[in-house]
Image (cartoon, grey):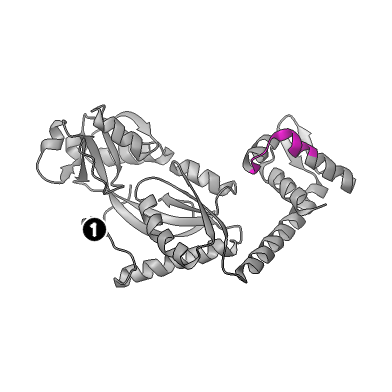
Amino acid sequence: MDLRSLHYFATVAEELSFTRAAERLGMSQPPLSSQIKGLEEELGVTLFLRGRRGLKLTEAGSLLYRRAKQLLELSEQTRQEILSLDGLSGDLRISLVEGRAPYLLARWLAGFRLEYPQVRVHLWNGSGDEVLERLNRGLADLALVAAPYNPEQLDGFFVGREPWVAILSREHPLAREAGPFLPLRKLVGQPLFIPNRRSRAASLRAWFEELGEEPRIAGDLSNYIDAVALAEQNAGICIYPMSTYTENPLVVKKIITESARQVGYALVWKRSERQPELAREFINFVQDCMEEERRGTQPYRLPPEEFLPPEDTPYL
């Protein structure tokens, strides 16, 4: 019984599926099943009950899972402590949504890697639901998400906010209106593309209900590139967080007002698990950055044209 076998077993115990566990481990299912079978033979017990509804831990399996988690956590802690003797190193896995999240993260990583150049960072982008799923499945140490998130399952803190905007073709009549703002009422009757997070459609409908109107939702999308592509071709208007300051000559972004909404971003991690030293160090680093930003002494430059909604702007 070695640490690798325990790691494989613990992953199957958490997923209760050889298919999902193999995907999480980055391996095919047959060798994983063989590993679990070998562990059962070595211990002389049955660890899983296999039925039509999937896997279920036996009493022996539940006991081994508790012990395996303790041993694996102790092993990781020991490894990190040994590595820290020569400076902090290792792999930091962060999943994040689009919008402002990549730009916030880039600020922190630039400074963090100056302090810890041996750290390797692995980033994965996706929709809010996908990012949280990866965190819950152990495929990420930390996640940078758009609020809201479940505080019963996750710990975290807010790290930024930005307005919701309308992204539209430069040829669209609304793009030619003067100024950077666009009242919500101007979007009534327009074909709209919105982020595909499950909670967004309901929130957006409630937003339009303030006007006594129903939004005309033409579809949903999962990333900023889709939003820009659709707007470029004048396929519709995309309602999306402001996201980036990178200029695109084919589209126009107008901040939605009357009434305005904002989106908040949070750095989160699983409440039920003790974070590896590297993740804890990054969390502390980000908190220090946030404090320096509040004092105006941050080591990085903020975009001079950054627009922040008033603090009391409702969240969407």
Query: In this image, 90 relative to 2: left or right?
Result: left
Q: Position of residue 84 (x, y in %)?
A: 60, 69
Query: Residue 105 appears in which quarter of the rendering?
Result: bottom left
Residue interval drawn in magenta: 25-34
- Marks counted in the figure total 1
294 shown above or below 143: below
For mark 1, give the secondary structure. loop
- Residue 32 falls within the magenta-colored stretch: yes
Query: In this image, 274 relative to 175: left or right?
Result: right
Query: Residue at point 83% right, 45% down?
Result: 39
Query: Residue at point 56% right, 63% down?
Result: 278
Q: Nearer the viewer, residue 269 or 209?
A: 269
210 shown above or below 281: above
- Residue 257 falls within the magenta-colored stretch: no
> Callout 1: few (<14), some (14-19), or many (20+) C-alpha neighbours within 10 Å?
few
Query: Residue 177 appears in which quarter of the rendering?
Result: top left
Query: In this image, 243 relative to 274: left or right?
Result: left
Q: Position of residue 101 (x, y in %)?
A: 38, 51
Query: In this image, 223 relative to 176: left or right?
Result: right
Q: Position of residue 13 (x, y in %)?
A: 71, 45
Q: Is residue 152 visible?
A: no
Q: Amino acid at mark 1?
A: Pro
Task: Write down the residue under mark 1.
Answer: 310
Q: Residue lying farthest right?
A: 44
294 shown above or below 98: below
Q: Residue lying farthest left?
A: 178
Q: Is residue 108 visible?
A: yes
Q: Position of residue 176 (x, y in %)?
A: 11, 36
